[in-house]
Image (cartoon, helix red, strand yellow):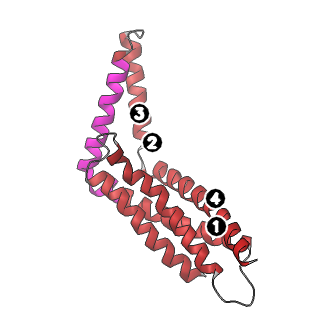
């Protein structure tokens, strides 16, 4: 089972990580359109597809004892963890090896923050400056690899859990 976890986790993790790299390297973070949403949506679909195919594969194994729900959930969570680790590695690569992309990403977000607070006419100049600086500090804190890792773990594990339950119920219903 652990061999299948590694195979499915790395296969779909590399697909998902490629979407992270495509998003940043091609500058798809610059605009918000349907085209630029494809890598983000693919990061939901690829882990789900990986877990689905993993559960289907382990349910077809001819063993002395059939797979139970606990084993299926454990295996799917491990597959999801490997996928999340691949995504984290891709983001970490962009964060520390492609600093030009991160500078552009930060600059665009800083401009958006400033435009948002400058449009608010109810704020005084000193309050506006404080709010802009606070928002920039929050953005800098949330752009780190740790925040990305938490987000990826939550996304992949929750997607894997739901897909695993649905697939396990579907597969066991067919074979019953």
* Quarter of the view holding residue 141: top left
Query: Which structural element holds mark 4?
Result: helix
Q: Are marks 3 and 2 in contact (CB under 8 Å)?
A: no
**Mark linked to residue 137:** 3
Overall secondary structure of the magenta section:
helix
Lower position in the chain sequence, tag 4 or tag 3: 3
Q: Which residue is mark 4?
A: 162
Lower position in the chain sequence, tag 4 or tag 2: 2
Question: Which residue is found at the position 37% from the left and 20% from the top?
Answer: 117
Q: Which residue is mark 1?
A: 167
Q: Are marks 3 and 1 in contact (CB under 8 Å)?
A: no
Query: Which structural element holds mark 1?
Result: helix
Q: Are marks 2 and 1 in contact (CB under 8 Å)?
A: no
Residue 104 located left or right of residue 139: left
Question: Which residue is found at the position 63% from the left and 61% from the top?
Answer: 161
Question: Which residue is found at the position 38% from the left and 10% from the top?
Answer: 121
Rendered location of residue 2, percent (x, y): 58, 80
Q: Is residue 109 above or below residue 176?
A: above
Rendered location of residue 88, percent (x, y): 44, 59
Lower position in the chain sequence, tag 3 or tag 1: 3
* Quarter of the view holding residue 153: bottom right
Asked if residue 43 is among those painted magenta in the image, a careful observer would answer no
Of circles 4 and 2, which is in front? 4
Lower position in the chain sequence, tag 4 or tag 1: 4
Of circles 2 and 1, which is in front? 1
Asked if residue 102 is among those painted magenta in the image, a careful observer would answer yes
The part of the chain drawn in magenta is: 93-118
Q: Name the one closer to the observer, 37 or 132.
A: 37
Residue 110 located left or right of residue 40: left
Q: CA distance from mark 3 to mark 2?
A: 9 Å
């Amino acid at each position: 089972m652990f061999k299948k976890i590694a195979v499915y986790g790395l296969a779909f993790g590399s697909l998902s990580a490629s979407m992270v790299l495509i998003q940043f390297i091609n500058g798809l973070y610059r605009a918000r359109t349907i085209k630029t949403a494809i890598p983000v949506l693919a990061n939901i679909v690829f882990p789900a597809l990986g877990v689905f195919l993993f559960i289907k594969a382990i349910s077809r194994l001819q063993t002395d004892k059939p797979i139970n729900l606990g084993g299926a959930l454990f295996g799917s969570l491990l597959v999801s963890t490997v996928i999340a680790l691949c995504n984290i590695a891709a983001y970490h690569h962009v964060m520390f090896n492609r600093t030009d992309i991160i500078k552009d990403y930060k600059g665009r977000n800083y401009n958006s923050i400033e435009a948002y607070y400058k449009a608010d006419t109810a704020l005084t100049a000193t309050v506006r400056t404080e709010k802009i600086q606070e928002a920039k500090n929050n953005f800098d804190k949330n752009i780190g690899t740790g925040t990305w890792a938490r987000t990826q773990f939550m996304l992949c594990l929750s997607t894997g859990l739901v897909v695993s339950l649905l697939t396990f119920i579907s597969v066991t219903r067919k074979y019953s």
